Amino acid sequence: MTTRRLLIALCLLAAWTVSSAAPTHPQQRKKPRAATSPTAGPAYATRKDAMQAANEIALRRKLKRTSVRRAMAQARFIPQIAKLILPPTVGVAKNWQLYRSRFIEPIRINAGVRFWQENRATLERAEKETGVPAEIIVGIIGVETIYGQHMGNYRIIDALATLSFDFPPSHPRAAERGPFFRAELEEFLNLTLRSGIDPLSPRGSYAGAMGLPQFMPSSWNRFAIDYDGDGKIDLFRSPADAIGSVANYFKAFNWQAGLPTHYPVSFDTGRLELDALLTPDILPTFSVASFIAKGAVLEGAALQHKGPLALVELHNGDAPPSYLAGTDNFYVITRYNWSSYYAMAVIELGQAVSAALNPIKPPTEPKSPD
């Protein structure tokens, strides 16, 4: 197994682990499981490593040293976060149908219809300017926060400080995740202090994600945009900024306008090379010809597809897996969260909201002659 292949596999495994309990966002974003305020532990003011990090952040980012140190000193260790970030001790079997049922359900669909109705013009504008369909944007915000209903209750500075300086060493990816969260803490302090935002105010997920689309600080700094034209970026209170920022995120990851996310696929079992088709994971690798040569069966528009395809496998517990042929756009959705299950939930929630918003009316029956 190549190093790249191994890293992709580990990322997908981690994404499934965290998403099996709650929706997540890119780079391991996840909602808290409790609505009440978390119990806070000691402040980081007495931690030499934390205060030294504050000095270094101030120097690198050209921020006021006193401001960074003051913010860092008031960050607190949250024991609950250190526990929540750990993978479950008992493995959970992947089950697409169960996972799907958490998102494609009446409460989320009805909230999505209201969100679409209230923001129709902005969604249409974003789709026209970026090529990202309104369905996908609506699906993302619905999976992430039920359109702002559940944005998280942890102080972001506490979450990021806890995961920066007290990331559980027993975690299988501790060596890489600790530095990742230290980088996000730096991004957060740079974002808030330069924007005049109190670093102690923003709240979000236990992994440090914020706002309607649950952007990590680095994603906020790179991809968030002022889409309502009020001169500031507000992913907490501005649906327009959230819509524009999600669209901009996908555009930055090369979303292709008009390209389907996936096609149906079946198999010619007599010549099926399933292991070979699954080896690249969800990274589109195969041309239509090579896909078919390995035993995949495509029909209709899929046969005219010009780009690469990936065989996406979705396990269903004890039932047989589901399969689909993923395109480059399916892969782009997984850049928001490294999980094919997440990507399908986004796609199908957006479709369900669209169908509820625009129901197909049955044809009118002709009147009987008098």
Image (cartoon, grey):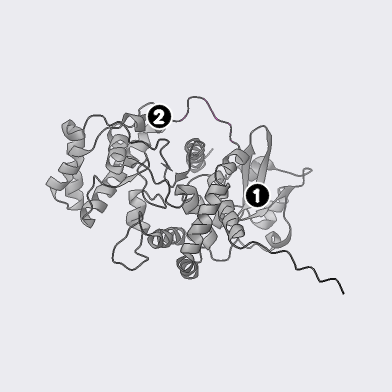
Residue at x 37% of width, y 51% of height:
211
Residue 349 part of the magenta segment: no
Compared across the picture, whether 197 is left or right of 86 comes to left
Tell me the quarter of the image containing the C terminus.
bottom right
Q: Residues within 10 Å of mark 2 (few under 14, many from 20)?
A: few
Horizontal and vertical percent position of residue 103: 55, 46
**First along the sequence among labels 2 and 1:** 2
Residue lying at the far left in this picture: please name it.
Answer: 66
Residue where numbered disc 2 is placed: 171
Horizontal and vertical percent position of residue 26: 43, 47
Chain part drawn in magenta = 87-94
Residue where numbered disc 1 is placed: 324
Residue lying at the far bottom in this picture: please name it.
Answer: 370
- Choose top left, top right, bottom left or bottom right for residue 301: bottom right
Between 142 and 117, the one nearer to me in the picture: 117
- Which amino acid, by three-letter code, is at mark 2? His
- Choose top left, top right, bottom left or bottom right for residue 85: top left
Q: Secondary structure at mark 1?
A: strand
